[in-house]
Amino acid sequence: MISLLLCVASIHNDRMQTAIPTSFMRGGTSRGPFFLETDLPADVAVRDRVLLAVMGSPDKRQIDGLGGAHPLTSKVGIVRRSTTAGVDVDFLFAQLQPEQDTVDTTPNCGNMLAAVVPFALERGLIEASGDETTVRVLTLNTGMQCDITVQTPMTPQGREVRYDGEARIDGVPGASAPITINFLDTAGSVCAGLLPTGQVCDKVHIEPLAGQEEFEPFDIAVTCIDNGMPMVLFRAADMGCTGYETPAQLNANIALKARIEALRLHTGKLMGLGDVSKLNYPKMTLIAAPQAGGSVSTRCFIPHVCHEAVGVLGAVTIGTACVLDGSITQGIAVVPEGLRKTLSIEHPSGEFSVELGLDPSDTQKVTRAALLRTARLIMRGEVMIPSTIWTNL
Ligand code: NQM
């Protein structure tokens, strides 16, 4: 009888599953669970299996996990106190996909980055220093550093992260407290340099891939660039598009997607990235003239689905291309004068303003990038995974 009761108890307690503390956060126009590094397995292969189980990948609907059935909601943040001099917090971003079993920690994500400091404050990794708290964050994915400022007003419980406010970013309903990100060094994040092919514009010839959708071979001019995100920019008109289509229209265009994927695989090699068939970059971006008073209009494939807005470092990289003489944006983009420029990157759900600082002695060199994001803690608690994957006892 006692053994039967024990058996029933063990079925009903949590040990059939492993509970992992997590904070579910929106960062900019992305969303996902954030973890303290110490709450996850140290072994990378086991950690990746845990993250796949957390998100419910691979599965189109991610029905058995926290993922939102889209790349922008298949993201994970892992945070720790930094041991690097001058840095407060280290951040590792992991990109998962609904339908793949991949956990990619090579590229950055500037949207998830916006939630790192609120998370670190919430979890006591760092302390608020005043009504505003500025924290230096090192992104372990690419070694990039940035300063992030969040609002931390005094409350009866002490200083707390403020989430409500008046700042609006396109792609997120309503208004929130502002979070500013100042990037210190972004050029050549994953690639060997800002212009990984050595040219500001390349003309490439693309043939259909064996066993894939057929199309007529084509020649196209591209700018391959990495100022925080490896990207391939090309004129929408050169792909037979206006560049003002909705993401749904572009996602439904199988023939276009086949041409873009063939271009991606070809330019990935030119950019020194090797075979990118299983990688989430380079991101493929259709460029057109601005439609709403901004600097340039974009439709960004990340890389197989069209973004509903545009990535943060994607926007920094596109803005950077706009200031380079000879890039494919020339004659299309409207670029303001001066060494400090605000470029408004138009995207399907609005625009994204990026402030770029140019080197006075070389106006072709972008030395800093600053931008506004918002973030919010949506839920905190424990995410459950089968203990057959990992047990943290
Ligand atoms: O470019 C989407 C996003 C991103 C990445 C993507 C990002 C960035 O919107 O820094 O933010 O390009 O996969 O979260």
Image (spheres, grey):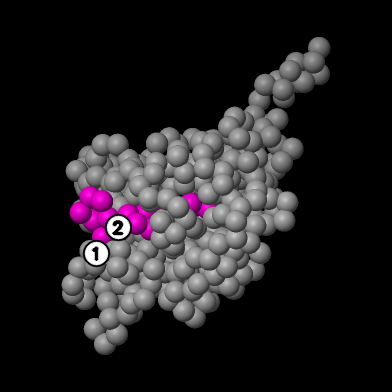
**88 or 308, which is in the foreground?**
308
Q: Mark 2 belongs to which amino acid?
A: Ala
For the point 81% across and 12% down, the residue is 1
Where residue 376 sits, quadrant-wise, is top left
Packing grade of label 1 (10 A; few <14, some 14-19, many >=20) is some
Furthest residue toward bottom: 361
**299 or 40, which is in the foreground?**
299
- Which residue in the protein does label 1 denote? 334
**253 or 102, which is in the foreground?**
253
Q: Residue 97, which numbered label? A: none
Left or right side of 105 for 327:
left
Left or right side of 256 for 236:
left
Q: Residue 289, which numbered label? A: 2
Furthest residue toward front: 216
The answer to whether marks 2 and 1 mark residues whose Cβ atoms lie closer than 8 Å is: yes
Residue 62: where, in percent of width, then height?
59, 34
Residue 17: where, in percent of width, then height?
67, 32
Q: Secondary structure at mark 1?
A: loop
For the point 67% across and 57% down, the residue is 209
For the point 29% across and 85% down, the residue is 362
Task: Decide whether residue 294 is among the magenta residues.
Answer: yes
Quarter of the image with the C terminus in it: top right
How far apart in space, not on screen, are marks 2 and 1 (Cα)? 8 Å
Task: Decide whether residue 154 is among the magenta residues.
Answer: no
Packing grade of label 2 (10 A; few <14, some 14-19, many >=20) is many
Q: Mark 1 belongs to which amino acid?
A: Val
Residue 316: where, in percent of width, then height?
36, 63
**352 or 83, which is in the foreground?**
352
In the image, residue 310 sits, relative to residue 5, either above or below, namely below
The magenta segment is: 285-304
User: Which numbered disc flags the more N-terminal residue, 2 or 1?
Assistant: 2
